[in-house]
């Protein structure tokens, strides 16, 4: 299977939904992906079991402030320099590119990087959604050593970090990113196909495209999306209150949705930290991270990023289960409610009323 | 020749003088050097022409806030991790350690790192004095590519930077250093003995020790020091005004010395930026960076750091020529008056009244 230019809008729509409000705007990534496919041809999409055990997979993501990413597209040189550094350190060429984070911009842009490098894209990612911090990836949860980060910036610098653990990789990569102008391309956990088994979330590129396609031309896009995601529809209503502040590079705040139609007299409150993390109704949790909570436009079922939430918007909120990896004790320790400072227990969304 | 524990006090005294007010306090470096020699034995001091052309020289320095260095000594693991990374990247063991900066703490501490690694110390450095920024080294002035920086911190992280130029190496290394707790060990410009010819300042470890020894037991330490340095004695007097502010990790300010004895009725003003950079009398330059300007206690001829200048101190100011490399156009561009924001022409100290 290959990814053509025509596949990009569906992929982008799906990645936005899996972004749960974060992960960066998919528009710039889409432009880059379409341009790269026009210039270099379609990108083969490969499954993990199509790769030989020692094939090198390079998980890539953009790191930085979303507002900067909107205005700067990674050039062709940045993925090339990362691939050269991988070859220098491992003594062989990468076999495939992987998205570190399927949610948001980082789900779409890897198509561009793969096209530019003439490499296939692996049908997998490291989150199955979007998360804000470097260590919140499946490779970390699976216990792979977080022993190498390669960063490449617009100026042409290459920085290689051999951190003692995932938290240090976040801290050092963030500092380098800020010094580079809050925008860098990052390879984290370069791994072999053998190591990737059970340590990446498979099928997520295909899934993002399927999610994006589900609403194309559907008579009731919201219902089509809910069914494609096997999601709960938590509420349909109107955004009546939104509080947001940007601190330390993160958007934090909350949003209140008052129900309309069948949902009138109900109120849902969302707690945000880049992504939508908790949905509360009458003080009760309706869905909570690492399960996925996405706000969509009620009419078109297009995902709305936390930064784009506006008073008066007619929106619906969908919630659905995360990958089982995030429900393990290491998964919850890494990206469960406590990792974001919430004193709330995790209960799977399908068990909540 | 070897460096024994007994040599350290003289080396430290000399390094403090060559530090021109900056380079960090020599006390912690001395403790580390003495401890390492006791544990691992004396450190061979080798001249550049004793090394085979392909011998790898690792220039090392501590980078960070001086106030942090006073309280944290680099462990044995940090130089070991840097040496391992050098071996990984170059495929062979380092042959010698070099001080990147002979002035101040970074002139003494490399004795400890060499002892811990069981390697000789090269009788050379990259400045012949102290300078505040990473790119202000002779290797940069000589045109060696600033293409590799290796950093190691107390936590155990290793960061390798392949910067596009020396200014980016400063910017990225500084960011990594701050993220690591404002204290890291850094190898900059790993080079072969062949590359080092003309690109390092030779004989500076020997010189620092000779400068330190000159005042030991001398009846007139100030005169002995002046003669050992072939320096001009700009003034002997009393510190009557000192203004200092710490901004962006640097100490900036000025100090006024009013002459006493034969110098009464004269006043010298020093402009400081970590180091003493300009000496002015009646608005006329008496000495200016990159020439060396050091404030010493008049009685003992012990160097006084810019951070230790105090109202009422009885001090003398010495100034002497820098290495000829700093007087080339690239040298002056890198570390001349304009590089520190002064709109003053450089005139060699020996040509000034």
Image (cartoon, coloured by chain):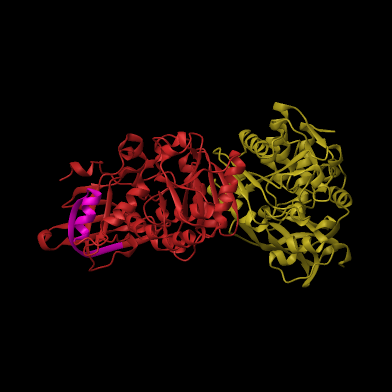
Chain colours: A yellow, B red
Q: Please indicate, yes or no, whether residue A40 appears anywhere in the rendered image.
A: yes
Residue shown at the point (74%, 33%) measured from the top left = A119
Quadrant in which the N terminus of chain A appears: top right
Up the image or down, A75 lies above or below A175; here it is above
Q: Report the side of B276 relative to B350 (left or right).
A: right
Q: Answer whether residue A56 is magenta in the image.
A: no
Q: Report the side of A289 relative to B60 (left or right).
A: right
Up the image or down, A54 lies above or below A330; here it is above
Residue shown at the point (54%, 43%) measured from the top left = B94
The percent coordinates of residue B313 (x first, y second) are: 24, 67
The percent coordinates of residue B235 (x first, y second) are: 17, 56
In front: A268, or A102?
A102
Q: Answer whether residue B232 is magenta in the image.
A: yes
Q: Please indicate, yes or no, whether residue A177 appears anywhere in the rendered image.
A: no
Residue B299, picture quadrant:
bottom left
Over which residues does the magenta segment extend? B220-243
In front: B102, or A3?
B102
């Amino acid at each position: 299977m290959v990814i053509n230019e025509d596949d990009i809008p569906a992929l982008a729509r799906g990645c936005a939904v899996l972004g749960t409000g974060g992960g960066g705007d998919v528009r710039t990534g889409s432009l880059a992906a379409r341009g790269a496919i026009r210039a270099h041809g379609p990108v083969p999409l490969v499954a993990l079991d199509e790769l030989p055990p020692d094939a090198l997979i390079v998980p890539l993501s953009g790191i930085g402030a979303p507002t900067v990413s909107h205005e700067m597209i990674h050039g062709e040189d940045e993925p090339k320099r990362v691939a050269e550094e991988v070859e220098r350190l491992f003594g062989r060429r990468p076999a495939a590119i992987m998205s570190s984070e399927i949610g948001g911009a980082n789900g779409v842009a890897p198509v561009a990087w793969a096209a530019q490098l003439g490499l296939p894209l692996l049908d997998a990612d490291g989150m199955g959604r979007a998360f804000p911090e470097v260590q919140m990836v499946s490779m970390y949860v699976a216990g792979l050593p977080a022993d190498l980060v390669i960063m490449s910036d617009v100026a042409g610098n290459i920085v290689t970090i051999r951190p003692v653990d995932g938290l240090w990789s976040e801290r050092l990569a963030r500092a380098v990113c800020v010094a580079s102008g809050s925008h860098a391309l990052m390879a984290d956990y370069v791994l072999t196909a053998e190591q990737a088994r059970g340590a990446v979330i498979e099928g997520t590129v295909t899934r993002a495209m399927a999610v994006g396609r589900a609403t194309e031309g559907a008579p009731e896009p919201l219902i089509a999306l809910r069914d494609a995601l096997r999601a709960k529809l938590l509420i349909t209503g109107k955004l009546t209150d939104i509080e947001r502040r940007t601190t330390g590079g993160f958007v934090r705040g909350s949003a209140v949705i008052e129900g309309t139609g069948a949902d009138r007299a109900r109120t849902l409150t969302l707690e945000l930290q880049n992504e939508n993390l908790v949905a509360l109704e009458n003080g009760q949790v309706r869905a909570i991270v690492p399960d996925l909570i996405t706000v969509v436009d009620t009419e078109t079922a297009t995902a709305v990023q936390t930064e784009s939430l506006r008073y008066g918007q007619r929106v619906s909120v969908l919630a659905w289960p995360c990958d089982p990896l995030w429900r393990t004790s290491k998964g919850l320790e890494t990206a469960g409610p406590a990792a974001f400072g919430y004193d709330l227990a995790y209960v799977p969304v399908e068990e909540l009323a």
